[in-house]
Image (spheres, coloured by chain):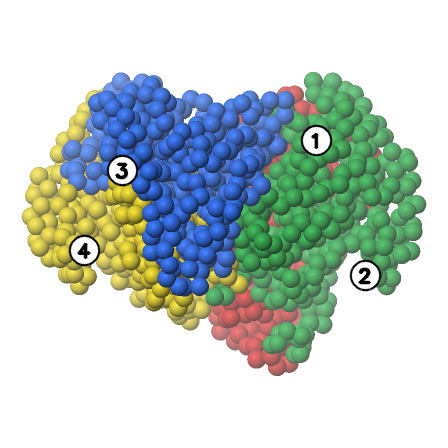
Chain colours: A red, B green, C blue, D yellow
Amino acid sequence: MSYNTFGRVFRFTTWGESHGPALGAVVDGCPAGLSLSEADIQPWLDRRRPGTSRFTTQRREPDEVRILSGVFEGRTTGTPISLMIENVDQRSKDYGEVALAYRPGHADYAYDAKYGFRDYRGGGRSSARETAARVAAGAVARKVIPQVRIRAWVEAIGGDAVDPAAFDDAAIDENPFFCPDRAAAARWEVLVDAARKAGSSLGAVVTCEATGVPAGWGAPLYAKLDSELAAAIMSINAVKGVEIGDGFAAAALSGEANADAMRPGGTDAAGPRFLANHAGGIAGGIATGQPIRVRAAFKPTSSILTPVETITRDGAATEIATRGRHDPCVGIRGVPVVEAMMALVLADQALLHRAQMG
Amino acid sequence: MSYNTFGRVFRFTTWGESHGPALGAVVDGCPAGLSLSEADIQPWLDRRRPGTSRFTTQRREPDEVRILSGVFEGRTTGTPISLMIENVDQRSKDYGEVALAYRPGHADYAYDAKYGFRDYRGGGRSSARETAARVAAGAVARKVIPQVRIRAWVEAIGGDAVDPAAFDDAAIDENPFFCPDRAAAARWEVLVDAARKAGSSLGAVVTCEATGVPAGWGAPLYAKLDSELAAAIMSINAVKGVEIGDGFAAAALSGEANADAMRPGGTDAAGPRFLANHAGGIAGGIATGQPIRVRAAFKPTSSILTPVETITRDGAATEIATRGRHDPCVGIRGVPVVEAMMALVLADQALLHRAQMG
Amino acid sequence: MSYNTFGRVFRFTTWGESHGPALGAVVDGCPAGLSLSEADIQPWLDRRRPGTSRFTTQRREPDEVRILSGVFEGRTTGTPISLMIENVDQRSKDYGEVALAYRPGHADYAYDAKYGFRDYRGGGRSSARETAARVAAGAVARKVIPQVRIRAWVEAIGGDAVDPAAFDDAAIDENPFFCPDRAAAARWEVLVDAARKAGSSLGAVVTCEATGVPAGWGAPLYAKLDSELAAAIMSINAVKGVEIGDGFAAAALSGEANADAMRPGGTDAAGPRFLANHAGGIAGGIATGQPIRVRAAFKPTSSILTPVETITRDGAATEIATRGRHDPCVGIRGVPVVEAMMALVLADQALLHRAQMG
Amino acid sequence: MSYNTFGRVFRFTTWGESHGPALGAVVDGCPAGLSLSEADIQPWLDRRRPGTSRFTTQRREPDEVRILSGVFEGRTTGTPISLMIENVDQRSKDYGEVALAYRPGHADYAYDAKYGFRDYRGGGRSSARETAARVAAGAVARKVIPQVRIRAWVEAIGGDAVDPAAFDDAAIDENPFFCPDRAAAARWEVLVDAARKAGSSLGAVVTCEATGVPAGWGAPLYAKLDSELAAAIMSINAVKGVEIGDGFAAAALSGEANADAMRPGGTDAAGPRFLANHAGGIAGGIATGQPIRVRAAFKPTSSILTPVETITRDGAATEIATRGRHDPCVGIRGVPVVEAMMALVLADQALLHRAQMG
């Protein structure tokens, strides 16, 4: 079976394949009365849009979103919001050999094993193109939680990390890598160009921070805020790891070193002032009022020009070099997607918390 | 709100607090006709049981499970299986000061912020004691997927990792650390003793591997096998990071280096033979037939004897040193819990896949 | 598969068999801070308790409930509330022949067809004994919606209906039939006695009314208030029909006759005063602020002493006369169960609505 | 909140308003490999299409469905199937006065009470136009359960019922009323014409029968087959009552009269031959292998030309006569909708049962 719906109260369902006529999302459980139009959604889609620099896939998609329901006279009505994005630049003929052989690291073999056959054109449902629908849904989620600021960036590409001391929020939108460190951005230009020209690809680490989340959001035990974020982010194509706060680094610390000590005088009325945020803003699955911090590991794009050993659908040995048009570093365009998933999880938890408070 | 149910078709709900009369799980959606008795569950609980060595909490709990429903004449009936474990060794008087002040890193402050008050005795619902119910439910899950072998171990404590070359499956159950490397186990004895005596605690990394999972399990896109595992494992107390396969290491690799090349001749009838398993057995959210590999980062126990700055419920500055009885390294007893969550996710995905196949 | 959880935000899961050691419910998603003790639950269980008159089963069960979790110092903590009721008066030996042959109208054959075998003792999971757990959970639900008054009664037994003009709320708790019409109660005493002595059984109609439900509760389209009530009430043992408001009678009316005309001056601040309530207080799946009215048809108990043609497990022709101890009219004890389901649905919708309103 | 998704494993989500640009459904959890094209869906939509006789609304909608995802080379891929139907004959100007005053019996007031405002054009989301999406989704469900035949008809209009002795399946599709009794159809022509000309409307009863459902489908206790059907059918616009089998009539019977006695020799291999079907094919929430029989009560259309007392949005007294274009008897076009809901519930239960059987 497939499950293409996410969320408990604020829910979204995505649909669509890379080379089908369109893709979209249905957002359900959105409160009524929020102002919403295509203009609220389009900018987020534009950040994720392919073909905007030589560091992303050269597929040209305008990614224009249409709202088909759930909005009346500029405001949400409380009924399902249907969002649709047409595909216009499919080139399915590029995928002849993908139909016949499996790309290692891609979902090709696994989909065949599960479903008996697959829509091989551009990866079908397993294409990262699906994430456009998530970004559109995420734009709606942002309207539900206007008090929250969500910001993601690329922290490392191919093992080359930004210098935390050089972090400049303003830099993030000034380069094609969502890189907060201008020097690192310059290095990555060389690095990604080299990978691209070599027919290779690179992995990346994306960090996402949400500020303004009040203490108390989170639904223990199995819809803990960190558990939901882990599910949401691990569901993004190519993500293989998720950390909350210090993540794996915390596993090497002592209890004292990892403690987020508290003092009186938080910005929140009665809340504490925290002296550190090793926990990434979540304790016991519930927000502490500190910034929520999440990191995501993106593996390198599986579709590469460099030939790799594989087998055909019939089980014969072969090699595959994936032509088509692909991102040399899929993690870059992961930035708006991680932000969207953060927004979607937080909107859901915001509504759940509201139900609790009475 | 709280969500204490996990799963889609094979589901479990846990309940209970650290110092309440009992805790338990209701397992629903289990197929009928499986042989099941307390004797199938108790050994797994015994592996997680506290007080078995000086490296775990000294609370003495027999953790005896009773099956209250869903089994008739030794077989599951298809109806809900209610499992109950009585608490017998509560010492609530130890928690006087936890009632008044917040332990940094613990859920104390967050629960108060969410619910307005909390059962402070032994951490109440946020106590790792709850994981006993997961382990009991996990034992039922194992019966649903007898073809799968699930095995976890501690890979590192306080930053001191095992030597992969020294890995010996037989060693895991021979030392109190679930350590597959005898030399590392000897080092950890010193390390954990030192932390314990210093009133400190240590983080740990747990690895879990499931073999025998057939290609095809997994429910894309938002119930992908990796997404469900991430949610399941991130919901465990103290876990702050989850990796599938190479995880964050993959983010530093090139596409070629990360490719799991295939050749004909897999053990599975028509399946491929994989030359590597960077992906941890999951592609596109679906099992490839390779071993499923997951890593979990456990932060150090928050409840430590070393005093830490904090605030009282009334917002006044204070220090807290947590007396009570606590694990110096909560990751150690995380091993059977990670295994249980793996079993619970896989049982659910097995049934979902069955629905698909017809 | 089985699904033993009901609800969206306020959820409950029941477990247990007629002749197992105990049965119970886990209530999850209950807001924190509500006062709750066994004394809040027991009176509702006592209303449903068997053996209180000669018109119900003679099984003697004290139905004492224990709260095992989710309450601390007399208030709900927001965590799962585990409720347990021990079975003390099982007489499994009475059911020898039920093990071998199928009672027509009962779930015996269907359970075997589904699960391959069944716990035949007292009907196992399909026994109306399970409804004790619902009543216990319903008592918790009532605490969530203190502004709502829920009241059910028996409207007809074996086709003999109460006289609406003789309706007296005070009468309901004065006779063993929950009958609001004292003359009808006297007639039913004769009627049910005759059925009981003849080894027969009788059907019944139960009406339930909830007042104080504010306009706006309900979650269209597939969790409409009427849809949820229909599901909840049809899930009760022996119920074969559900009506909202005029129900089937409305199907014989014209639009004008069925219109619930409105005038200014409702009790609700800005709400209308309705001149009729054909709709049973629900329009478009949403409460109108009028009383919610539901009717449930209970079929006659299937377990009767009168022999009926049937087959054995092996497919041979036989006759069955069900000994054991059974209600001559299961609809009577359905009254507290229908009330409980009403409370459970409304508590869930109350919380859902709260999430919406912000 | 709103919940516009129905189902457990085979799920569908509908979206769209009466006067928006389009409406649709996303079907998720459909097995892969089923043949599917628009031609499989269109005939069912055509049965429900408005404007085909003078006995339905005169709105002219071609109701052409497009499949936007989830199908590749004529077969389902296992991924979400997005279905879209464009609205082409909106006349929103007809609804000026509905914007200002509440139609008694309609959802107008309730939506305002819930959401604070509403899309009043043609009833917005509460319009029966939404059921087109259900019918489209239902056509997909039918492909999942080809062994099942689902057939509904109108049993009564305005209290005038068909003669069971005159039942002729072939007649159902020969008249504009889905009436199985030709004499009744002739009477109804006069009856409905009279109501239409008088600016009135009529209620109706729809019966639906599913044959070929194997014993064993159904997921007790809270997803019982009858409970799911009740929820599904009560969620249809204008439905106020649901019966399984004899329904309310069973409440007037004795246990012997209501017993569905069994003899050896069923058509099913080892199954019984039933001598009656009072239970409507469901016992204990599980299918018995007999035909599943459900009845639905449709109230008369609320939108009538006859003026009715009501209030304005501002709370002032007024009268309303609904112009626009409306069905004089909304139950007629309910026939394909009831069938669709039956198909959707059964497809879901079929897959759930499959998960159980292994």
* Residue denoted by label 3: C158
What amino acid is labelled 4 in the image? Phe
* Residue denoted by label 2: B169
Q: Are marks 3 and 2 in contact (CB under 8 Å)?
A: no
Secondary structure, mark 1, is loop
Q: CA distance from mark 3 to mark 2?
A: 69 Å
Q: CA distance from mark 1 to mark 3?
A: 51 Å
The residue mark sitting in front, 3 or 2, is: 3
* Horizontal side, residue D205 vs residue B80: left or right: left
Residue D152: which numbered mark, if any? none
The residue mark sitting in front, 1 or 2, is: 1
Residue A343 x, y percent position in the rendering: 56, 42
Badge 3 crowding class, 10 Å Cα cut-off, few under 14, some 14 to 19, many 20 or more, is many
* Residues tagged by mark 1 and mark 2 found on one chain of the structure: yes
Q: Residue furthest bottom?
A: A316
* Horizontal side, residue D268 vs residue B223: left or right: left
What amino acid is labelled 2 in the image? Asp
Q: CA distance from mark 1 to mark 2?
A: 36 Å
What amino acid is labelled 3 in the image? Gly
* Residue denoted by label 1: B19
Residue C153 x, y percent position in the rendering: 33, 29
Q: Specify which label sits upstream in the sequence, 1 or 2.
A: 1
At horizontal 51% and vertical 24% (from top left) the residue drawn is: C40
The subunit carrying tag 2 is: B
Secondary structure, mark 2, is helix
* Residue denoted by label 4: D178
Q: Is residue A180 visible?
A: no
Q: CA distance from mark 4 to mark 1?
A: 64 Å
* Horizontal side, residue D151 vs residue A30: left or right: left
At horizontal 59% and vertical 58% (from top left) the residue drawn is: B34
